[in-house]
């Protein structure tokens, strides 16, 4: 990194340290933790756009799939629905559905003409009714079991850290399915396709209660670090905190956040190291050549579609990994919070502001934009309170105070416009 890059990172670090000194170290460390995860998300999108020019507008779907992994891996199984054969019947129905799809694909490849059309109709229509006849009764069994607390199949009860690579695999599998069908499309059609797929994934997670309780949410997901309450009741920790002149409650929250920060920073550094190695290798130069001129790359014998699929899967896997980390940090899965504004638009702003095609730029953008996303809201409330301090109570004053909630979006737009105007290639441009 050059001097400019170091100064930019020092500026962001100073903002976070200033937050800790002037407000709360708990808030500052919370920004650090989500900044680390945001940097990982930005790295994933940067792989797709900065390396290969793939416009993925369905980032939220891959993040949500990654977030599903801690539920399926770390939560304990709901033994009652397994002993009642509800879960087994769901799995059997899903296997039948997969078999129907495979049969339709085989018929489409091996048959021709009218016979193929009739076979596809019979397979798809008959398979749909067969699948629903098996699937719906099994779902009713699972979702009827204590819907206030469970109503899902649960997980495997394994260590939550194992869910992180599983989240990456889930997102990678979905990216493979999407890429096999959509990467042959033009860039604008690819954007529409990924947008639709992302919304489909979110809709499934919200409505299929048997999987992860839908909008009823899953809480109490195991954590890889101690609980604050356990630390506060530990005599050794209480004595240790007293040695620093801190109360056990504050010390426990700070220690837990620091432990999370250590885990997240380790993952981020490993990804940056691998990304830099890949970007500066012959493979990375080939990907940039494909991005800059697909026709010339194809003329040189490069399989453009295959390379696009490769980088699309890799970038989506990184997003899925970050999605699993978010759910682990929150200890809960809330499908209703997955919206494109937060998990697609904001990530794209991070990549563009930081500098697409530059891994360190994506990291910088992740930290900077997340800091602004968190702090602009209280800043906006304070600004509107100052502006309206001398105004009489009425409709105009109420309207101005209510509009403070929109300061986040206004600020993101202003930052994006300023960067595009004065540094079109981002704060840390690609070399």
Image: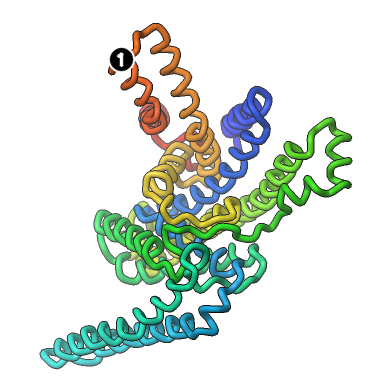
Image spot of residue 409 (x, y percent): 37, 33
Q: Quadrant of the N terminus?
A: top right
* Residue 395 horizontal side relative to residue 245, left or right: left
The answer to which image quadrant residue 191 occupies is bottom left
Please give the name of the residue rendered at 35% of the width and 85% of the height, measured from the top-left corner.
134
Q: 102 or 293: which is nearer to us? A: 102
**Residue located at (25% from left, 54% from top):** 188
Give coordinates of residue 177: x percent, y percent: 37, 71
Q: How many marks?
A: 1
Residue at x 15%, y 87% (from the top left corner): 117
Pinpoint residue 395: horizontal percent, then vertical percent.
28, 18
Q: Is residue 264 left or right of residue 200?
A: right
Residue plotted at (84% across, 30% down): 245
Which residue in the structure is indicated by mark 1? Answer: 394
- The foreground one among 59 and 260 is 260
Left-right relation of 293 to 85 = left
- Looking at the image, is 40 positioned above or below residue 393? below
User: In the rendering, at what x and y percent does residue 64 appear?
Assistant: 45, 58
Q: Seen in the image, is 99 located left or right of residue 313? A: left
Q: Is residue 155 above or below residue 104?
A: above
Residue placed most toward the observer, 334 or 329: 334
Q: Based on the displayed image, in which of its 4 quarters is residue 389 positioned? A: top left
Q: Residues within 10 Å of mark 1 (few under 14, many from 20)?
A: few
Element at label 1: loop
Q: Does residue 302 appear anywhere in the picture?
A: no
Pick the front one: 44 or 70 = 70
Q: Residue furthest left?
A: 114
Vertical relation: 290 (above or below) 411: below
Vertical placement of 267 versus 24: above or below?
below
């Amino acid at each position: 990194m050059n001097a400019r890059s170091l100064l930019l990172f020092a500026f962001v670090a100073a903002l976070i340290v200033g937050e800790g000194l002037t407000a709360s170290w708990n808030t500052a460390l919370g920004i650090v933790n989500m900044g680390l995860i945001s940097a990982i998300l930005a790295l994933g999108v940067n792989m797709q756009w900065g390396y290969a020019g793939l416009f993925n507008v369905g980032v939220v779907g891959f993040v949500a799939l990654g977030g599903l992994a801690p539920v399926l891996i770390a939560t304990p199984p709901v033994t009652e629905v397994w002993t009642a054969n509800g879960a087994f019947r769901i799995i059997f129905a899903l296997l039948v559905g997969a078999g129907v799809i495979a049969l339709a694909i085989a018929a489409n490849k091996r048959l021709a003409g009218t016979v193929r059309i009739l076979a596809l109709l019979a397979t798809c229509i008959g398979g749909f009714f067969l699948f629903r006849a098996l699937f719906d009764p099994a779902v009713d069994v699972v979702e009827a079991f204590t819907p206030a607390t469970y109503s899902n199949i649960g997980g495997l009860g394994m260590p939550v850290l194992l869910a992180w690579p599983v989240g990456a695999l889930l997102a990678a599998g979905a990216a493979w399915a999407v890429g096999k069908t959509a990467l042959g499309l033009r860039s604008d059609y690819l954007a529409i396709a990924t947008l639709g797929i992302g919304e489909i994934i979110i809709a499934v997670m919200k409505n299929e209660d048997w999987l992860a309780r839908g909008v009823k949410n899953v809480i109490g997901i195991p954590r890889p670090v101690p609980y604050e309450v356990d630390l506060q009741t530990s005599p050794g920790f209480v004595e240790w905190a007293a040695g620093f002149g801190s109360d056990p409650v504050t010390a426990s929250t700070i220690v837990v956040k620091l432990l999370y920060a250590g885990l997240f920073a380790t993952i981020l550094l490993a990804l940056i190291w691998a990304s830099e190695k890949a970007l500066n290798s012959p493979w990375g130069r080939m990907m940039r050549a494909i991005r800059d001129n697909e026709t010339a790359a194809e003329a040189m014998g490069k399989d453009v579609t295959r390379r696009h699929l490769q980088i699309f899967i890799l970038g989506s896997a990184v997003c899925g990994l970050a999605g699993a980390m978010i759910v682990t940090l929150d200890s809960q899965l809330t499908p209703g919070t997955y919206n494109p504004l937060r998990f697609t638009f904001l990530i794209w702003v991070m990549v563009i502001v930081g500098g697409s095609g530059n891994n360190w730029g994506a990291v910088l953008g992740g930290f900077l934009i997340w800091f602004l996303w968190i702090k602009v809201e209280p800043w906006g409330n304070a600004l509107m309170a100052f502006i309206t301090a001398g105004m009489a109570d009425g409709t105009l004053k109420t309207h101005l105070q209510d509009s403070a909630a929109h300061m986040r979006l206004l600020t993101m737009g202003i930052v994006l416009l300023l960067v595009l105007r004065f540094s079109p290639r981002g704060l840390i441009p690609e070399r």
